[in-house]
Image: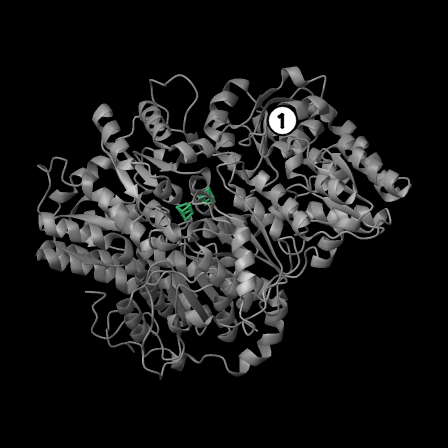
Amino acid sequence: MTTRTANPVSGPFVATRNACKLCTPLGACLAFAGVEGARTILHGSQGCATYIRRYMISHFKEPVDIASSNFSESATIFGGRDNLQDGLANVTRQYQPAVIGIATTCLAETIGEDVGMYLHEIRSQASPDGPALPPVVHVGTPSYCGTHAEGYLATVHALVSQLAEDGSQRDHINVFPNMFSPADLRYLKEIGADFGLPVTLLPDYSDTLDGPTWEEYQLIPQGGTPLAAVRRTGQARSSIEFTWVHGEKASAGQWLEEHFGVRNHRLPVPIGLRASDALFDVLGSICDRETPARHAAERGRLIDSLIDGHKYLFERRAVVFGEEDLVAGIVGLLGELGVHPVLCASGGDTGRLRSAIARLVPDQADRIQVRQATDFADLEELAGDLKPDILIGNSKGYWLSRRLKAPLVRIGFPIHDRVGGARLLHVGYRGAQQLADRIVNTLLESLQEQSDEGYSYL
Amino acid sequence: MISVLEQRAAQIHQDGRSPFAMDCEKHSVAGSVSQRACVFCGSRVVLYPVADALHLIHGPVGCAAYTWDIRGALSSGPQLHRMSFSTDLGEKDVIYGGEPKLYQALVQLIDHYRPKAAFVYSTCIVGVIGDDVGAICRRVEAEKGLPVLPVHSEGFKGTKKDGYQSACAALFQLVGTGATDDISPLSLNILGDFNIAGETWLIRNYYERMGIQVVATITGDGRVDDIRRAHGAALNVVQCSGSMTHLARMMEDKYGIPSFRVSYFGLEDMSRALYEVADHFGDGQVRQRAAELVRDEVAAILPDLRRYKKMLRGKRAAIYTGGAFKAFSLVRSLRTLGMKTVLAGSQTGNREDYRLLRELCDEDTILVDDTNPLELAKFVQEKEVDLLIGGVKERPIAYKLGIGFCDHNHERKIGLAGFEGLRQFAREVHSTVMSPVWRLVPRRRRQQPARAANDVSTASLRPSCAGECSACDLPDCSIPAGQEILP
Ligand code: SF4
Ligand code: SF4
């Protein structure tokens, strides 16, 4: 889709062309959507909330209501305190939420809104006959620092650091997922249950963003991590979180370890066999149990299936793009399949993608090109010469795939051009199985298509 | 229970007997989940289809990322409009100003992509960090020798409508800068059609078949050079009430080009548009050709319309559109299909629009301005609708409640304008309303017995032409008697 003309300028483009990232508040909205009874207000002007809603609706195909404090010109000049107050009151009245999440947009951050102070004032001045405000969690999400991935983690961090309570240790563990699909979240809960471990998954949008049809319209979709459970994250036996690229500042697990002594296990996103092993090992060590039989069997089937497909995968060339953690996870899986990830790219800019990849596939790292803070137009220019056999990433890679004539395996977020994005499984043995099957079958399909004679068996 | 916010009550009209006084054109209520976007969104939709221009969005990345290739506006040539360019301001730019980055980005992109013009959209934070976007545009324009037009679209400075105005202001700077020598006196500009799924091509073809030259299509399949000479056309035909009237007015003031508004959706509105254009030129031949065109096109779709109507008769629809003018056409089109509109609303309608809508609809039709998902859900449930027509943001409301949905927004891939478009519209409506999936949905299963008892009888539909306009044999055609559809 790129219109290219002669006379290209040298040097990297100053502008971002077809961004391979989204803005910070989107991540916040996703995380807040996984708290039971929560409603989100974006503090800033209307457009951001509407755009983010539409973006999420197109992926999840579920209602996503995000309110805005709806700045006008005067709010921008004199501050948005009144807007926030009205917004809180109106959201409380209409939705009766159990908790309200506030994330700031660039505009509010730029004019220096102090949401914490506003909240304090609003609470202390609240009239006794007005509707009682539920607990409010706020997070600063200026988009000019970070991407949606940072916004997501910062919000989980904010939920924990503003709500968690100390207390005597209980049996449960905390699991802080990364930007996983609802199907991934359901599966993580299943794994926890099979280990006999009570799990607090935060956030948990497995029902709120992938639910059944309704008899009556629901003010807030059912499901999500209950507020009480968020509070109890401070009393867990340990936490597990999945990120190798984001720093400690964004880490909810780290915060709980520092403040309440809850032991934190920092794992890579559990995509692929070894990364899944790491998760199962940690779960096993926490409750001193072997991997439950059913999951051991799934692991066995996974290895067996990788053998079935290995020849079609070996040394095939892949381009992987998306959030840094996701890309790193996929590279781990590809390393196990024998696929060569020729280019790994993200619009994110933590500076840690390369080191994460080097930890996951040490013997391959020096022949993988890694690009951070990149965009789809750059990717297109880079990837053309690399002659990839397959692309792995979200559906915004469609144009890349069309131009390079290389098939795209759709994973992650967003999936805007297919149904079922919410039901794609990525994590654990079962996720690895499904991804591996999809990757090998996509390659087989393109081989079949390229064949002059055609064939109907392997 | 879903309740309506106090501050919003005046923007809803529920009772046909109470006097009509509806509030609209207001800033959205804080904390209400408005379906509207922002000023920038208004500008972006209007200018987006100009295919050989560079569209650079000055601000942080989100505003550009969310508007990358999301609209179905097609181009017959260059595809530059489908790229999403952002200055992607970082923390340093926000502190020290984004002007250097804007300048460099512009120069580099212009050198690389060689556009015919550049539009530079200001988003919210540009409005507060104080970049002089106009000055940078002038500088690059002088250096690079092409129009570089600032679009003042800071999201917080008004509503989507203000964004339309900024877009028109930018377009108006182009108009009047091109040569007009080979333009026929029988000529027009198509304003306010965005070539969704090729609709502009269809409409252009109608006018050309009538013997009228189309000078510029603004902005569907738009080209900078065409827009530059648009002032040479004899007439501006404006669809999409909200967005383009401003440009037409400016062109009338400066170049004396008359204009009127039309709609290309539905049998009646489409035919009326062609006849009005023909009448405007007062040319017998043009009029004759228009009549032939309408006859042929209507004849081609009638059998299908009849078939659909048989199946859809009496079904109930809710409409929520961006502009109100489209809602009028939809009410009529649904009536052509034997359906009843029980809820109608728009994001940006004005008082006059709602008064007309009130007249057009039935007495008990609920009207809403700048509604939110909860209100929509509430009314859609109360009115037991079979179909919701809207955009992507409204779709899950319908689906969650087990109700059919038809996308009538700019994302769609199916042309709904023109005569052929009505056939496609009927097919779209039919394929969702009649789907067997609704029989599986809990709400519907419970509702069915009740509905059977008090189903809308066709008698409650507006009086039909009852065959008075002899030429048309569409059963229960809703075209008012005397309105000439067929010659
Ligand atoms: S930042 Fe402003 S211009 Fe951009 S989407 Fe938000 S409201 Fe619109
Ligand atoms: S202004 Fe910031 S928060 Fe709003 S859409 Fe743009 S990048 Fe996102």
- Decide if residue A176 is on the left or right side of residue A296: left
Q: Report x, y in % for residue A106.
A: 46, 43
Relative to residue A256, is residue B320 depicted above or below?
below
Relative to residue B203, is residue B370 depicted above or below?
below
Of B64 and B91, the residue lying toward us: B91
Write the residue at 39% across / 75% down: B365
Q: Amino acid at mark 1?
A: Arg
Write the residue at 8% across / 58% down: B282
Relative to residue B311, is residue B191 depicted above or below?
above
Dot 1 crowding, Cα within 10 Å, few <14, some 14–19, many 20+: some
Q: Report x, y in % for residue A230.
A: 71, 53
- Decide if residue B151 is on the left or right side of residue A195: left
Of A117 and A80, the residue lying toward us: A117
Relative to residue A437, is residue B127 depicted above or below?
below
Of A229 and A220, the residue lying toward us: A229
Q: Is residue B381 visible?
A: yes
**Mark 1 belongs to chain:** A
Write the residue at 84% across / 50% down: A169
Write the residue at 37% across / 50% down: A77
Q: Secondary structure at mark 1?
A: loop
Q: Report x, y in % for residue A140.
A: 54, 45
Q: Is residue B385 visible?
A: no
Of A116 and B18, the residue lying toward us: A116
Q: Report x, y in % for residue B352.
A: 26, 68
Q: How many marks?
A: 1
Quadrant placement of the C terminus of chain B: bottom left
Q: How is the image coloured?
A: one colour
Quadrant placement of the N terminus of chain B: bottom right
Q: Which residue is mark 1?
A: A352
Is the residue marked 1 within 8 Å of ligand 2, measured from its CB? Answer: no
